[in-house]
Every structure is written in C-alpha cells, then in structure tokens.
Amino acid sequence: MFYLKYRPKTIREIDNLSAKIMIGKILESSTLPHAFLLVGQKGTGKTSTARIIAKAVNCLNNKFSQSAKTSEVDTYEPCNKCANCQSIALSSFTDVIEMDAASNRGIEDIKNLIRETSFLPMSGGYRVFIIDEAHMITNEGFNALLKTLEEPPKSAIFILATTNLEKLPKTIISRCLKINFGKASNTDIFSMLKRISKSENINFKDDLLRLIASHSENSFRDGAKILEEINLQKIKTIEEIEKYLGIRGRNDLIEIIEVKDLKKTLSWINDFAQNGGDFKNLIEDILSQLHSQLLIKNKVIDNESKEISLTISEISLLMKLLIEAYQNLRNTPIDSLPVEIALIEFYNRVEEKKLT
Ligand SMILES: Nc1ncnc2c1ncn2[C@@H]1O[C@H](COP(=O)(O)OP(=O)(O)OP(=O)(O)O)[C@@H](O)[C@H]1O
Ligand SMILES: [Mg+2]
Ligand SMILES: [Zn+2]
C-alpha cells in the first residue's frame, strides 16, 4: 500500500508546513515538553508524526543520543538506521508504548499506562507514551491521567493524538503542547503525490495529480490510496479518472435524470460500470450535488452552480431513493443494481404523480 510505504519517516518529510516548522523548533530547543497534543483531521499525519518524535528522542545518531554530548551531531532528525530507530519502526521498542484509545479506553487501561511511566527507559533516552484517538478515553480515564500528565517522571513523554479536540476535557488540553495539523491542503497532497509517482515511476501529468489531490478529502491517506487504485486500474487520461471518481459522471448523469430518459440512464450507468466507475463515489457525489441544489432552491445558500430543473419534492424523493441505494451497495451481487433500481423507481413515481 502506497500510503504505508510512503509514510513520512523524518520531520523533513512531513508535508504539513506549519506542523513541520513547529515540531522542528521544539526539537531544536533545549527543553522538551512532557506532553504533546496532535490535532487534525483523518490522514493528516498525526500517528506518523508521533512515531517520528518517538524516534527522534531515542535515536542513537542525533543530538538526543548520549554520545552526541561529546561529538558534533546537532541534528534532531531520527536517522532511521540505528537499532533504536529500527525497532521503533517495527513497534518492538520497549520504551515506546502505543495505546489505541479507541479500543483501550477505560480506567484500567489508563492505570496500567500510568504504572508504566514509573519505569526508567531501558535502551533509549525517553519512554514515550503515544495515545492515539485520545478523545475516546472515558471520563474516569481522563481523571486518572490528569496528575501524571501534569507532572510525569522526567524520562516520560506523552503524545496524544485526536481528530476531535472538542471531545477532550479542557484540563487535559491545557496540560499539553498543542500542534495543529488541520486539514491537508491540495498543494501539500499534490507534492506527496509527486513524491510517490517519482519513486514508483508513474508518469502522470500534473493536471491529473491535481485532480486526484482535489478529490482526496484533505487527507494524505486518501490521496495516496486513489493514486494507487488509479495506477492499478491502468487509467491514464483525465476523462477516465473523472469517470472513475464520478465527477464528470455526476454532471452528465444529473442532466440525463433531469429529462428522465430511462434508456439513456441505463446506458450511461452501463458505461460507467464498464469503465470501472465506483458507485459509492458516484452516489456520494450526486447526493451532495442534490443537497446543494436543495439549499439553493430554498435560498439558504447563494446560487453558485447552475440550478437544475427538478422540483424540490422530486429532489427529496430522489435523495431518499439514493440513500436506500447507498445502503444496498453492501449487499448487491451487481454493483450497478442499486442505482439502477433507484432511478427506475424515481421515474415511475414521478410519472404516477403526473397521471393522478
Ligand atoms: N504530512 C504528510 N506527508 C506525506 N504523507 C502523509 C503525511 N501525513 C500522512 N501521510 C500519509 O497518510 C497516511 C496516514 O497518516 P497518519 O496515519 O499519520 O494520519 P493520522 O493523522 O494519524 O490519521 P487518522 O486520524 O486517520 O489516524 C500515512 O501513511 C502517509 O502515507
Ligand atoms: Mg492516526
Ligand atoms: Zn536512529
């Protein structure tokens, strides 16, 4: 998987510019904070960064190592080669403890973790405690954690990561140094896609990579996944990608739905399926398009795109049918069926209404 293979391994490789600069400054300074809080949307690099920090402070070849005091090394980057860096990468380093709070969220889990903080590091300089999805910890768990988070033993560093800052108690937030990952920007994702393409020898034009970036929901992980899928499917042109992602698709199909032409509809869907189009993407795109049309027609938002000719009640009926189709995608033997059935049903109901 590209997104695992190209996970950033050094601070320099982190593409979120502001996060990169901030972490660099922190590691450059002489005092390390005892607790970090990494905040940002999915796939923006929180877990990757937590591991990079864990490596940096335990690396044997940078400024944090014991021998550095005497020699000239002053870089804070992990070398990714020494025994410590390598065993952290393999998750087999005893001084780096990762806890996924999504599955270990209770008071007992936290108590075990706190007990671990009292041990001195065995092979590194610091014991690093990474708590991923930290917002999932129970209230009792948070309360138990507070005191340790405020004054942990000198050799302990906490790194909390979360997608939902608002679900963390203020008392926890105020004890940590917060680093914002926000959303991955299209430019940042584009540069990641370039990096991957280069080393995988994928010859995609920049326009094409930009299109993928803009369809990645501001997540590096999603971007890397789409690039890999498109490469595997041997898709080469912008048209094919648009179809695959269901963008071009969406507009064409909505135009056909407006004139309620069943034959054209079915043949369009057939083409889409033949081209390896993704029906989940397609339904999501049409629904979001219909949703903004609903808001436009009700004057909730300004008319930024062309108004379609379906009435409000037609739009809401179609949305209802498409949501059903969306749920049925999981249990269909033929991918295209749920959308086909939804549209046939839609045309029939609109027709019935006209007759009565
Ligand atoms: N800054 C970045 N530069 C390049 N690639 C990145 C970056 N951040 C993340 N990625 C890619 O996205 C993938 C997911 O990153 P990571 O697991 O660190 O994100 P996360 O913020 O922890 O996401 P989640 O909230 O879903 O756990 C990585 O494997 C990597 O391929
Ligand atoms: Mg993560
Ligand atoms: Zn190292």
Image (cartoon, grey):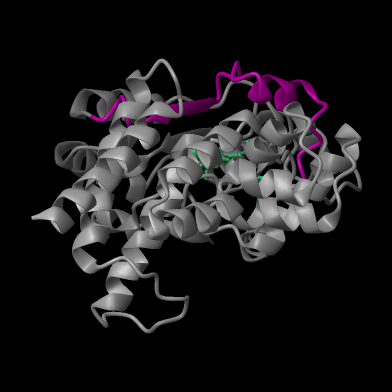
* Residue 103, position as x, y percentages in the image: 31, 25
In the picture, measured across the screen, residue 153 lies left or right of residue 14, that is left
Residue under the image location 53 percent in, 35 percent down:
278
Write down the region rendered in magenta: 76-105
324 is higher (above) or lower (below) than 328: below
Of residues 87 and 348, the one drawn nearer to the viewer in this rendering: 348
Q: Main secondary structure of the magenta part?
A: loop
331 is higher (above) or lower (below) than 71: above
Which image quarter has ligand 1?
A: top right
Residue 86 on the magenta span: yes
* Residue 284, position as x, y percentages in the image: 41, 47
Residue under the image location 63 percent in, 34 percent down:
125
In the picture, measured across the screen, residue 217 lies left or right of residue 240, that is left
Is residue 21 among the parts visible in the rendering?
Answer: yes
138 is higher (above) or lower (below) than 37: above
The quadrant where residue 67 appears = top right
Of residues 42 and 322, the one drawn nearer to the viewer in this rendering: 322
- Quadrant location of the N terminus in the rendered image: top right
- Quadrant location of the C terminus in the rendered image: bottom left
* Residue 127, position as x, y percentages in the image: 53, 32
Of residues 203 and 120, the one drawn nearer to the viewer in this rendering: 203
The quadrant where residue 190 appears = bottom right
Residue 231 on the magenta span: no
Is residue 162 among the parts visible in the rendering?
Answer: no
Residue under the image location 38 percent in, 34 percent down:
340
* Residue 261, position as x, y percentages in the image: 42, 50
Of residues 273 and 199, the one drawn nearer to the viewer in this rendering: 273
In the picture, measured across the screen, residue 127 lies left or right of residue 78, that is left
The extreme left residue here reads 356
